[in-house]
Structure formats: structure tokens, C-alpha cells
Image: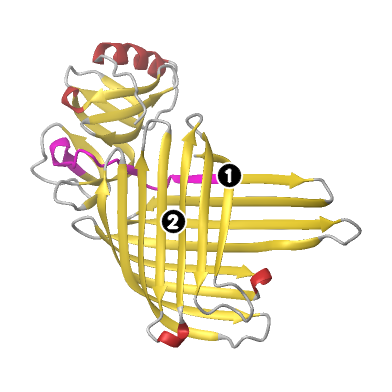
Amino acid sequence: MRSEPIFSVRAAVLGLGVLASAGMAMADEVILKNGDRLTVKVTRIQGGKVFVESKTLGKVILKVAEIERTTLDAPMVLTLKSGARVEVRVLTAETPKAQSGPSEGLAIGFAELRDEHEGENIGKVNGTLTASYSGVVNNTETQNVRADAKLWTSVAGGRIDFDGYYHYATEKKKDQDRSITENRWELGAQYSRYLANEMYFYANARLNRDPIRELDRRFVGGAGIGKSFIHNDTTTFTGQIGAAYVNEKFLDGTEDRDYVTLAVSYDLTHKVSDTVMFYHDLTWLPALRDRDGTIIYSSAGVRFKLSEAWSLDARVRLDYHSRPASDVRKDVYHYMVGISYKF
């Protein structure tokens, strides 16, 4: 995790006091045990610290032991020691004897939080955009354009994730017309509803098209149960199990298909160092009837951090179908090296 300076309470008060007097509108309020009030923006609460942002001091870390009360302008999703995920508006040094009303949001004590969990601001859209371009001019001219996106946001009682990609490539040989060698896209979305003990209910849908592989469209919709097994500063690991419905339509006359599958998936991220992160995910869709086949989506990559927002991404993706269109390979690999922007 990136190292950030821990300021003394007095230094933070002096700097943030300047901010308040300048009349800048910051949404959240932190009351320290010495009586000082700070008007800031709380970005996360994790590991016994409250991370705040100030336009004068930048990013500042306040220790929970120094804070009497924190009031958030918008609720934040936090995980309690019990494993429950709750929407919080007020955090206090002492655990409240009674909860606040719905208009104020839930009030809890700092001691009730699971230390390693990072809070998520409701309504804030987060995301990663990755793009790459390559070309060769020789006896054969080639052009490759690839763009990937992942977006997510916390909502009341849960989270919504979106992802998608578009890959396009052409080739022109000497004295021949340019031909398209890749033209595929995919869009996906998932809603997760938080349950107890780091578990959640999910419903998702995915649509993709790949005319080069004679696939006019493939729709996959499913639902099931997921669980966050690991969530700390260096590693996250979640798993899901459920069922899915698959609808496939082909361009070459292959018979259209509708079938039901199991749906098993996992997602892993591991921070190797402050600047290097490994990630890997896999989705396995085995049909309930053998004749309908099996679908596998999997990707793995390494992200090299260049700055707070920018990074270099190198990844490989596998798409596998045991029963593709006629005369089409069962597996296809995609390699990508590009620049990513995180917000």
C-alpha cells in the first residue's frame, strides 16, 4: 500500500483551519477529542485510520484514537466485525447505545469496524479504462485497436459493476484489399446485494458478438451466491456459484442454442509491491446437458503503477467454447499491453 504521511493532530488542525476559513465547501465533518472541528472530504476508513483530503494539505491521515465523531455528508458502506455490511453516516469514539433515525443514517462506533476493510462511498463511480494501439507498415500492413473498461459504484445495500471491451484489427497484404481480422465486443453488468458474513446475492448478464468466429451473439444471464473470502491491504479473493441461461445465435448456419449451465467464478487481486499488482479471474459455465458444451472466460495480468491515476497493463485473456460454430477453433487467446487510467 502506498505510504502516506501521518500528520499530528495539531498540524492537521492548522492546515485544515486555513481551508475552512477560505470558505471551501468540503462535505464531511471530523470532530477531534481536543474539541477541534475539521471540514474535509473523507475518502476511506481503514486500519484504525480515517483518510481525508484537503486542497491545502493534500491527503492527510487521522488516527481513529484522536477522533471523537465523524459525520459523513453521504453514507459510506463499511464492514463490521460481525461480517455485516452497513451504510454509515456517523462514526463515534464510543459505540452508540441507540441508532440514529433513517434521515441521519446509521451511527456506529469505530470499534465495531473490521480493521482491514476499506469503506466505499455510495453513489461514487469508480473505474479503470485501458487502451492500446499498434500498427506495422511493411509488405503487410496491420492495425490493432483495443479498449477495455471496468466501472463500479456502491448503491443502497449493495454494488453494481459494469465491464466491456472492443477489439478491432485489420490486415492489408501487398496488392490486396484490406481485410478485418478481429472485430469483437462484449458488455457485462452485475448487481450484488450484501448479506451477512461477507456473503452476497448476485444477478448478472453478459452479451458479446464475434463475427470473425461466426458468432452473431451470445447472451448469458445468471444469479447465485457469492462470498468475499479475503479482503485486506494486499489481497482480495471472491468466489461465486449459481446458475445461468445461455442463448447463442451463429452466422454460418450452425443451429441456434438455448441451454442452462452451472456458473462458478472467482476473482483474485494481489499487490506484489506498492507499484506492481497481479490480477486473475475465471468464469466456468458447464452445461447441465453434455451435448451443450462448456464455456470458460479467464484473464490474467500485471499492472505497473506509474502514478496515482495511470498505470501500464499487460494481460492475456482466454475465451473457450467446447462447441463453437462449424470450422472454428474452440479457444481464442487475446494479448494486450496498454495504458490504464483509474478514477
In the rendered view, would you say 174 is above or below 5? Answer: below
In the rendered view, would you say 296 is above or below 233? Answer: below
Amino acid at circle 2: Asp
Which residue, given by chain and number where applicable, does mark 1 sit on? 337
Q: Which mark is residue 111?
A: none
Mark closest to the chain's N terminus, 2 or 1: 2
Residue 81, percent from left and from top: 15, 46
Q: Which residues are magenta?
A: 107-130
Residue 10, percent from left and from top: 26, 11
Q: Mark 2 and mark 1: span between their CA atoms? A: 23 Å
Residue 115 lies in the magenta-colored region = yes
The answer to whether residue 165 is seen in the rendering is yes
User: For this rendering, which residue is in front, 266 or 158?
Assistant: 266
Which residue, given by chain and number where applicable, does mark 2 sit on? 161
Q: Quadrant of residue 216?
A: bottom right
Residue 327, percent from left and from top: 64, 79
Residue 77, percent from left and from top: 29, 47
Amino acid at circle 1: Val
Q: Is residue 176 left or right of residue 189?
A: right
Q: Quadrant of residue 157?
A: bottom left
In the rendered view, would you say 260 is above or below 50? Answer: below
